Structure formats: structure tokens, C-alpha cells
Image (cartoon, helix red, strand yellow):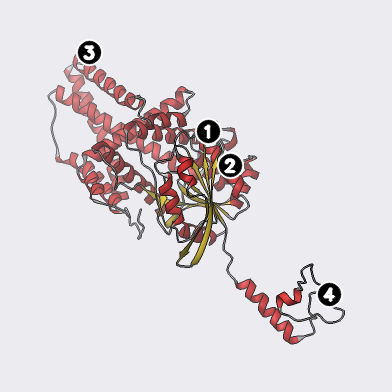
Amino acid sequence: MNDDNGYSPTQATGLGAPEAGAPDGFVRQSDPGMQAYAETFMDGLDSMPVRPTVGCIIPAYNEAETIAGVLDSLLMQTRLPDVIHLVVNNTSDDSVEIASHYAGPHTRMTPTGEQSTVVYVHDIGKNPDKKVGALNYGYSLVEHMDYLLGVDGDTTPEPDAIEHLVAEISSDNRIGGISAIYSIDDSAIDGLVAKFLIAGQRAQFSAFNMQNLLKGRNMAVLGGQFSIFSTQALRDVLRDSHQRTPWVNDSEVEDSLLSLQIKSAGYLTKISARARAHVGGMDTLRSLDAQQVKWNFGAIDLMWPGQRGDTRGQPFHPNLRLRWFEHLSMVLNMTTRFMFVVMLTWALAFHAFVFTPWWLVPPVAAVWLNFRVAHSMHFRNIKDYLFVLLVFPAELYMLIRMGHFVRAWWKFFSKAQTDNWAAQAKAERGKGVAWMYPFALATVVWAAAWAGWQYGPLTPDLKSDVLFVGWRLLAVVTVLQTAWMIIKASKRYRGYKA
């Protein structure tokens, strides 16, 4: 049987002509030699490795300064994505013009042979759903592929990052998504404040990464900066959650919610042991405050029961336990520090201050823990060590994080209707002073405590009793907190690098 061009199936396979009575293009089973050849041929096909397909999605909003570096880093991967879709939305800069130079096919030689990919640039214009809308637009373009790789418009992966992510997620069908190990490249950071803030964020990322690595590499949040997802897992999320799209626009932390839903669908959410990516850091107090308040507010929204109809009020979901621990730990840190300042102020005013060397144990334990965190960084440098050993920078950064924590909870309980995405964009443009409010409030409370102590109705005997009870209560809490820090600092990292 020939087609219009004279093509014959038997000519294509090289199996010879069919015998009489056999269907066109097939060889009778009675020929032992040809049967053996056919079996060998089919066994060879079955043993050939099948390369899973990967579709890369990059949601981009005003990323003119970074998008070229992101695309360059993706095109230099040892395992290229099969397709790269850059989805530009709500942009007011030159992101589209810069990215357009990368549009089209790209081929390069890798250690495993020649690989190809195609870059598409989509400008979807005004998009009310912002990053969520861009992600869902990208999902519609790659949902037929095996895996979806989400990359932020300011994230640059190490050259072997995709190779490691694909190898890990394809090795176990139970895995619904894997996040890379995140850090921030501080090599081009200028200015004392910016260097201080980036050092703090690097330490924050490192502690978070190591915590997840040591917990069986179970990742509570598949960060949108550089994570790979099984599209089958995403389809199961759509079915189980009755959603039309994987990401929803009513969550401040779309990546946390999706991670929770993937876990609820019966899949594992993991952090990679080797894939690494450098994310964009916040180099001003305003921008850092806006980002962290958005993250904390979104986490509270997921943690607090009854706030969201689509999570069925799951405050103790496995992916939220770490969130609860982080927030409770922050409450304890705030309590001990503020109580110490107030008690010290009262003691000095009452001329009852007595220094004891035991007070040095908690800060020494904190330095030891922070030093281990810094030493665990894969890309550590002298600035990471100085951030810890000078003590003051790490303590100041902790105070700044406390401000983010207070603002997030205040916004939640006040039920203020705020677009936190817009607030972050505004802060990154250098506008807004909301980051100062928690510190102003703390100053007012401290001043009131001092004034009440100095000019209030308390007698000297009652003041002495207050100091006696207060210092001992603070000592008990501090001893427990210090013991916990020592336990964490004593853990073996089992060869992991954050």
C-alpha cells in the first residue's frame, strides 16, 4: 500500500514485503528471523529514555533591569527548557523591547549533546490579576507538557539548576513540585544600608532553606522564584479545589496556597538538594517592609481558620505548621526583648541595676546559631560572617523583622482592605513611611512604661517586688529560649549547604 508519493510502510521499516494474505505493511508471525528482528527492534524502542518536556513561564512586571540576565541564565542551562514563555503584564518600562531580542529559536551544545528551545514574548497589557494572571496565562500555554517551571523576572539560576530539578521530580511520581535553594547575589550591591539589608535577607533565606532540608527536604512553600511543578499535580489541584486555574487572585501568597493544595492532593512538596537560584533582594527599608508584610499577611490569611472558603479552615495543615512555629517564635523574641528593655529601664531608674555574666549566655548562643547559619551558605562570603560576628547587624535586622510581623498582624486584625501587591510596588519606587509605625509605637509604649514607673503611684517596696518577679519571669523564658537556640545550633547539617 503506497501513499501518493509512492511511500511504502515496508520500505520505511526495512522488513521486506508482506506475505500473501497478510495485512498491508505487516509481516507474518511465521517468519522466525523477521519475528526475532521485530522483537529486538521493539525492545530497543522500549529501552530508549524518554525526555520529559518542560515549559518555562516567566511572569514579568517592570523587569527591564533584570530580564536580560534571567533569559541569558536560562539559555545557558545544561538542560534547556523545551519552551520559554515570557509573560509581560502591566509594564511601564522597556521589558518587552529588551526581551524581544531573545524571541525565537535557540540552539546550543551541552554536555549531553545539542539542545534547542524557543523563546516567546507575550505582552498581555493591563492585567488586573497581576502576577497570578500572568502565571495562569502561561499555564494555559504549557499545560500539555510534563512539567511547568516557574521563574521570577529577577531570578538567575545556576547553570545546572534545571537539570537537577528535572532529575529529582521525574525520579518519583509522588512529587508534585520542587523548589530550588534560594540565595541573593550580593556582589553588585552598593551602599551601607543596602549591604546590611541584603546580608540579613541572605541569612533569613539560609535559615529557612536549612530548616526545610533537615526536615526530610519537605518544603512548606514552593516559592515562585524558581520551582518546577508536575502538570498532572496541577490538574489534580484544579479538580480537587474546583478551580479553573492553578493560581488564584484572592491570596497574598499564591505560591503558599498552591503548595498547600498540592500537598492536600496527595503529592509531596520538596526542596532540591542541589538546584540553586539567585533571587532579587530588597535593598531599601520601604521595599523590604512591603515585601515581608505581604508575605506575613498572606501566611496569616492561610493560617487563621475560617478566613478562606477554599481551604476549608485548615490552620494545622502540614504545610502551615512551620508558619505557626515561625510566628510563635517571633512573639517570643518580641516579648523577651521588649521586656528586657523595660526591666532594664526600671532597674536603672530605681538604682537597682546589677550586672551578671550569665546575661552574656543568650547573645553568645544566638551568635553561635547565626554563625552556623552563615557557615552553611553555599555562596558565603566575609560579609555574611561580619553580619553575625558584629552582633549588632543581626540584632537590628531581627528588630526590623519584628516590625514587619507587627504590621502584618495589625493589618489582619484591623481588616484593612489594602492591595499589598500595589503597596510593594509603591515601596520599591521609594514611597511610603508605614515601615516606621511599629517602631514609633514601641517608643511610645516604652516612654509610657518609664513615665508610669517614675511618676506613678508605686511605692519603693512595690517597685522592688515588681523587679524581683519581673527579672525571674524573664530569666525563665530566656533560659528556655537559649536552650532551644543551643539545640538548633548543635544539629548536624548532614552535608547540606543552604
Q: Quadrant of the N terminus?
A: bottom right
- Distance from disc 2 to disc 4, alpha carbons, whole Å, reads 47 Å
Check residue 326 in the rendering and tell me which mark sits there, or answer none.
none
**Do residues under tags 1 and 4 come within 8 Å of each other at their CB atoms?**
no
Please state if 374 lies on the left or on the right of 36 as rendered: left
Residue nearest the viewer, comparing 484 with 99: 99
Check residue 305 in the rendering and tell me which mark sits there, or answer none.
1
Instruction: Please identify the quarter of the rendering in which residue 404 is found.
Output: top left
- Compare marks 2 and 4 and give the one earlier in the sequence: 4
- Compare marks 4 and 3 and give the one earlier in the sequence: 4
Q: Is residue 31 above or below residue 455?
A: below
The residue tagged 4 is 23
- Compare marks 2 and 1 and give the one earlier in the sequence: 2
The three-letter code of the residue at mark 1 reads Pro
The three-letter code of the residue at mark 2 reads Tyr
The residue tagged 3 is 457
- SS label for mark 1: loop
Residue 7 lies, in percent from the top left, at 76, 72
Residue 394 lies, in percent from the top left, at 26, 40
Residue 400 lies, in percent from the top left, at 31, 33
- Compare marks 3 and 2 and give the one earlier in the sequence: 2
- SS label for mark 4: loop
Instruction: Please identify the quarter of the rendering in which residue 295 is found.
Output: top left
